[in-house]
Structures are given as structure tokens and as C-alpha cells.
Amino acid sequence: MSTISVKAMTQLDETQPRTRKQDRFPLAGLLALATAGFITLLTETLPAGVLPAMSRDLGVTESAVGQTVTVYAIGSVIAAVPLTKATMGWPRRRLLLLAIAGFAVANTVTAISDNYVLTLGSRLLAGVVSGLLWAILAGYATRMVPAHQRGRAMAVAMAGAPIALSIGVPAGAFLARVLQWRIAFGIMTALTLLLIVWVLAAVPDFPGQGKEERLPLARTFRIPGVAPILFVTLVYVLAHSLLYTYIAPILDRLGMDGQVDAVLLTFGLLSLVSIWVTGALIDRRLRVLMITSCALFAAAVLLLGLVTDAPVLVYVSAAVWGLAFGGAATLLQTASAEAAGEAGDVAQSLIVTCWNLGIAAGGLFGGLLLGTTGASWLPWTALVLLAAALTATVGARAHGFPARSLNG
């Protein structure tokens, strides 16, 4: 064997372990990102499960305590885009740690505050760092893996939100009732501090973008595919918020007022199945999955609108709804990251803004419908919104939700 051949084989042997290391799926780091998402959503929704106790301790009405969730959403809406733009040049891990630390501060203040205004301030801070964290999470996940693993990485990193909805929120509310609502927020702080250590150990750092790489916000909107993805996000989440926020009066109309927890648990468990399916197929079937999600959600809503006195069909509707919704955040954020390319973080901040606008508008518009036409109209309104989402998704064949795999 010649000297050149020996040298070539030696070099090949040396590069093989490095290649295997590069292709190794960074599960620990991605799970840390998923935990950040879990903390974000649980922090947002936890007051909803402990309204009476917070109301008594803070000396305000339950309605006033409910505004701590509204203020959180407002913080996310107003901060996501400007903060993301302002911090695009920052090293990514430093920014991630700063956002996570913001939750530690906000939850600590919420846990110890006896003043309603101070509590509102802490919730606004939590919303602000939430908007920043969600904006960078998707881009962070895709930078940790090669192109052919992006969808799978996004599915893992985004899993924290639906898990928080399906398991974390009921568990957090139960914990707050059994122990004390302040202890529940204290536990959130402890979990956040552990997450900081986890991120330092398992999540790699990446540089921010140079000024010459950054696209103006207006040009981000004009990137092919970004606008339809934002539209689908807004109307899809608006439809979900109409139903999720007002599921109690919807069930009360059907004589199922004592089964809200069971219906939402059904929704949550099937959401977990949806996460698994999305993670397995997203790299090859993103378009099919998004179309299926819209269609299944529409079918669930149609069934819910038609049901009059068949509780089992309500549970079927909740199951199909969960199967449709669980992977939606991953699908929308992956589609946005792929369409926007180098402008991915800005596009993600727009997704966060549209998502929270959908939640806020669902609460407001749903309340107006409930007070005028009654709960029976909520499913039909959601169905119209989902028809628009499905139409836009199908129409975005060239850009947005293209008819090709993420692998090219």
C-alpha cells in the first residue's frame, strides 16, 4: 500500500468520529429548550388555575387576577418584535439565559408579592421575556442540527408548550391547591434555576447576526411564504382560543358543566400523540401535516357544533381537536424558519406576535359572542376561521407550506 493511500485512510479514520459526533442528535440540549418552552407557557397560564386563592391574598376580584394573564400576553405582543430586532447581534446563549433568568425574577416576585400592582408588573416582565424566548427558540433548535434533522429538532424543542397545556397546567393548578399558590410559583423559580445550569451544560453557543446580514422588518414580510404562514397562525390560534377559553360555557350548554377537566384532559393526551406524530413525519411531510391539522381541527369543531345530547361525541371532538392542535406550533414555526432563512428570528418574533394576538382576540371576540349570540355560535365561528386557515395552507404550495420535504 502506498504512502499516499495510508495517509488518506488515516485522514478518513480521523474524520469519521467527528462526522458521527456532528450527526449525533443533541437531545439533551433540545430538551433544555423544550423545558424553557414548558416554563414559559406554565408561567403564563398558572394564575387561571388559582384565581380564588390569588384573589383572596391580593385583595382584588377574580376578574382582576385574570388580568395577570392578559398582561402577560400583552407583554409578549409588544416586546417580541422590537426586542428580537434589538438583540440580533447578541450571542445566542447569553440571550437565552437572560430570558430564562427573567422568568426566575418574575416568578419570584409573583410568589412573594402582596401588592396587586407589583404582581401585574412581574407578570408584564414575564410576558416580555416570553416574547423574546419564543422568538429565538426555533432558530436555536435548527442551528443545533444538520438540515435533514431540523424538523425533528423543532418537534423536540417545541414540545414543551403542548405538554404544559396538557399536563403542566392541570398539575400546576392541583399543586397550588394542595400546597399554596405562592409555593407553586416558587417551584417554578427553582425549576428555572435548574434550567440555567442545564443550558450552560448542554446547549451550545452561537454568534448573533452581523448588521449586514439583518433584513429590515418590512422586507421580512415580503419574503415569499412568510405572509401566508403568519395569516394561518393568526386565524388558527384565534379559532383555538375561541374554544379553549370558553369551553366551560360550551359544555354547560350541552349539560356537561361538571366535565370540563375530563374533556380538556382528553384534548391534552391526544395533543401528546400529535407531538410524537409530528416529530416522526415533519422532515418529510410538513405540508401534509399542516393541511391535515387544519382539516382535523375543522372536523372536530363541526362535530362539536352539531352535538346536542351525546357526551361521547364531545369527547371524540376533543380527542380529534387535540390530535390536530398538538403539533401545530411546531409545524408553523418550522415552516416560518424554512421560509425566512437568515431572517428566521425576526419571522419567529412575528409568529409569536400573531400567536398571542390570536389568543387575546379569541378571549375578547369570544366574550362578545358569548354575551350576544350565546355559546352555540362559538364552534361555527371557529369553523369559518379554520376554513380560511385551510384555504391559505393549501394555496401556499410554492412558498410557506411547499410541496417538498425539508431535506430538499
Image (tube, rainbow, N blue to C red):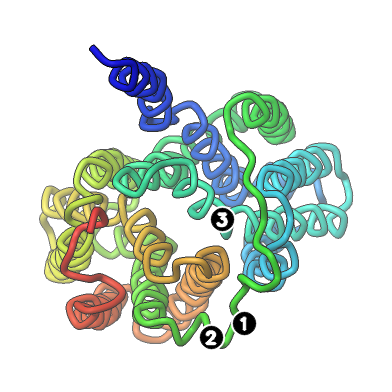
Q: Residues within 10 Å of mark 2 (few under 14, many from 20)?
A: few
Relative to 94, residue 19 above or below: above
Residue farthest to the front, as pictured? 2
- Please rate how many residues cluster around mark 3, counting C-alpha atoms within 10 Å: few if below 14, some from 14 to 19, many from 20: many
Look at the image and tell me whether residue 75 can be seen.
no
Nearer-the-camera pick, 63 or 71: 71
Nearest to the observer: residue 383 or residue 207: 207
Q: Which tag is nearer the camera, tag 3 or tag 1? A: 1
Q: Position of residue 14 (x, y in %)?
A: 41, 19
**Coordinates of residue 42 in the picture (x, y in percent):** 56, 43
Q: Is residue 278 left or right of residue 102?
A: left
Name the kind of residue labelled 2 in the image. Answer: Arg
Ranked by sequence position, the earlier of labels 3 and 1 is: 3
Q: Tell me the residue that label 2 is attached to.
A: 219
The residue carrying mark 1 is 216
Q: Which mark is residue 134?
A: 3
Q: Residue at x 25, y 83 (%)?
A: 388
Q: Name which residue lies at 67% across and 43% down.
A: 93
Rendered-image quadrant of the N terminus: top left
Report the disc number at residue 206.
Answer: none
